[in-house]
Image (cartoon, rainbow, N blue to C red):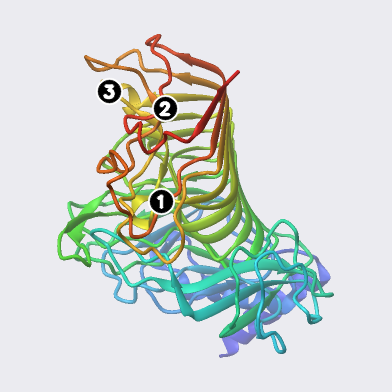
């Protein structure tokens, strides 16, 4: 105890009077790559939070972490510099044990006095003590009733919205559902100052657990708004022919205005497991995971593993988000799992898993190359639905990464027989202005690429009956379309389904 108190005293005087950052070595970290430094890392951040001081890792140090007890709570700026953090998961038992958790300055709280809300409503109807990110839930209504090998019974209707002190709902995060009955409403206060975390090389020695859905959390969790993570590198080593999945090395949840800039991430090996329908399914890990968050940006970031190597799972996944941006990124996949409201991908390269999405609002893809079976796959396990518009501008589409197969700009599947918990529809309007389809290596008897895949090959005429009608696109506007094969961009192999879709060629 005397040693700890004396160290804290040194940290206190150094941070307050000399203005120097807290260092891990002040709390007993060895940084030798052998000694488990987790406890020292946790203690350093605890002291820094009390002092309001930043934290700095020692350049050239290697901090080894194998234990799974405790998490370093981050509430001040951090500079990891050139230090390395080796996270050894080969013997970990407590799978939810992130090394760092970036927390808000004030805790969440329940909002009183709001009984119902309507889609597009502009004011919450109550005042808040500060600007907040508000989560609304109605557990009486189920959405995203998944279909297929990983089928389920759906999830509580929920979403996030930015709300001012006066109760004004930010126009950029509008409510997309009606809430005649609210069963829970929570507010997450937004910190005014921007917190920065930069640098560091993180190496995960992969777990050797059974390949089943038991997600590991061993990296960095961000639960605070207004955060910038920059120049961080994550590497993975020691992967075997089996292993449990990871929820994400960087996990962003229940917060707003987070930017990941200049970071280098890694894809994880894809494994097989048994899904809820009792059949074998591919099981993967995301290195970047975002849930219940708004205004999340990934800038000038890439992955170490080849974006076109199908041995590795798609690097990015999200659920219940609004306003996600990729700008200048090179990743194997963008994935909006259980919906995104508004998304932008620009100046980027996406690999073999392409763009997977369902959701709302406007999805813009600009100055981007996609090498996949389709430019956009509207996820069939959630009804291949997009309630809004798609804009594709000055992009390159390489069907199947150049393999001799025909490709579609939009692909998916919905036979109209499954209740997903909402009306499923293709984008109301699709605008494609500037698209090069690099289909030079096309198959024999090739008619050309298509705007839409078949979606429902069973629907051949008016005799087909849908229990839950799938709404086709109203209008497609095409301009500046080129193909390497010289073949035209056709509408769809399912002419009947798109018979009423208006095609405007400029």
Q: Which mark is residue 470?
A: 1
Question: Closest to the observer: 275 or 419?
Answer: 419
Secondary structure under the numbered disc 3 in the rendered image: loop
Q: Is residue 428 visible?
A: yes
Which residue reaches farthest front?
Answer: 463
Residue at the disc numbered 3:
403
Identify the image quadrant of residue 112: bottom right
Q: Quadrant of the N terminus?
A: bottom right
Measured Cα–Cα span from mark 1 to mark 2: 17 Å
Q: Position of residue 161 (x, y in %)?
A: 67, 67
Question: Closest to the observer: 129 or 50?
Answer: 129
Measured Cα–Cα span from mark 1 to mark 3: 31 Å
Secondary structure under the numbered disc 1 in the rendered image: loop
Q: Is residue 325 visible?
A: no
Which comes before the other along the chain, label 1 or label 2?
1
At a point 41% along the width and 27% down the height, the residue shown is 491
At a point 53% along the width and 39% down the height, the residue shown is 474
Q: Position of residue 466 (x, y in %)?
A: 33, 54
Position of residue 456 relative to residue 433, above or below, is below
Q: Position of residue 481 (x, y in %)?
A: 52, 17
> Around disc 2, counting alpha carbons within 10 Å, would you say few (fewer than 14), some (14 to 19), or many (20 or more)?
many
Q: Position of residue 320 (x, y in %)?
A: 52, 63
Which residue reaches farthest left?
Answer: 279
- For marks 1 and 3, give the one nearer the viewer: 1
Position of residue 43 relative to residue 436, above or below, is below
Left or right placement of residue 32 versus residue 269 in this view: right
Position of residue 142 relative to residue 500, above or below, is below
At a point 60% along the width and 18% down the height, the residue shown is 506
Residue at the disc numbered 2:
491
Q: Are marks 1 and 3 in contact (CB under 8 Å)?
A: no
């Amino acid at each position: 105890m005397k040693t700890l108190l004396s160290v804290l005293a040194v940290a206190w005087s150094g941070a307050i009077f000399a203005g120097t950052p807290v260092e891990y070595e002040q709390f007993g970290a060895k940084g030798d790559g052998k000694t488990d430094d987790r406890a020292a890392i946790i203690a350093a951040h605890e002291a820094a939070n009390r002092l309001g001081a930043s934290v700095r890792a020692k350049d050239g140090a290697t901090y080894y972490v194998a234990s799974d007890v405790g998490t370093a709570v981050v509430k001040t700026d951090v500079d990891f510099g050139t230090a390395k953090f080796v996270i050894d998961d080969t013997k970990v038992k407590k799978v939810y044990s992130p090394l760092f958790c970036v927390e808000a300055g004030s805790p969440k709280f329940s909002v009183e006095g709001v009984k119902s809300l309507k889609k597009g409503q502009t004011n919450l109807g109550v005042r808040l003590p500060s600007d907040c990110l508000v989560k609304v839930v109605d557990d009486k209504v189920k959405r995203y009733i998944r279909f297929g090998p990983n089928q389920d019974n759906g999830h509580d209707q929920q979403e996030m919205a930015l709300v001012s002190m006066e109760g004004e709902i930010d126009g950029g995060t509008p409510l997309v559902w009606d809430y005649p009955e609210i069963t829970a409403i929570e507010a997450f206060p937004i910190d005014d100052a921007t917190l920065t975390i930069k640098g560091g090389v993180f190496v995960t020695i992969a777990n050797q657990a059974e390949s089943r859905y038991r997600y590991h959390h061993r990296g960095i969790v961000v639960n605070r708004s207004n955060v910038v993570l920059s120049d961080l590198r994550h590497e993975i080593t020691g992967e075997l022919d089996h292993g449990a999945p990871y929820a994400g090395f960087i996990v962003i949840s229940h917060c707003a205005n987070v930017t990941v800039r200049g970071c280098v991430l890694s894809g994880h090996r894809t494994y097989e497991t048994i899904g809820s329908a009792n059949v074998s399914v591919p099981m993967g890990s995301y290195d970047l995971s975002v849930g219940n968050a708004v205004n999340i940006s990934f800038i000038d970031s890439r992955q170490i593993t080849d974006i076109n190597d199908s041995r590795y799972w798609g690097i990015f996944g999200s659920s219940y988000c609004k306003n996600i941006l990729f700008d200048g990124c090179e990743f194997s996949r963008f994935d909006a799992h259980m919906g995104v409201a508004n998304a932008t991908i620009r100046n980027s390269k996406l690999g073999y898993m392409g763009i997977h999405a369902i959701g709302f609002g406007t999805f813009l893809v600009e100055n981007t190359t996609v090498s996949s079976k389709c430019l956009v796959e509207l996820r069939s396990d959630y009804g291949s639905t997009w309630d809004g518009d798609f804009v594709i501008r000055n992009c390159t589409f390489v069907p199947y990464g150049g393999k001799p197969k025909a490709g579609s700009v939009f692909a998916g599947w919905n036979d109209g027989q499954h209740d997903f918990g909402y009306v499923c529809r293709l984008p109301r309007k699709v605008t494609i202005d500037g698209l090069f389809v690099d289909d030079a290596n096309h198959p024999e008897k090739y008619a050309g690429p298509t705007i839409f895949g078949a979606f429902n090959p069973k629907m051949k005429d008016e005799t087909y009956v849908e229990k839950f009608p799938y709404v086709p696109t109203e209008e497609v506007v095409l301009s500046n379309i080129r193909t390497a094969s010289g073949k035209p961009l056709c509408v769809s192999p399912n002419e009947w389904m798109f018979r009423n879709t208006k095609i405007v060629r400029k």
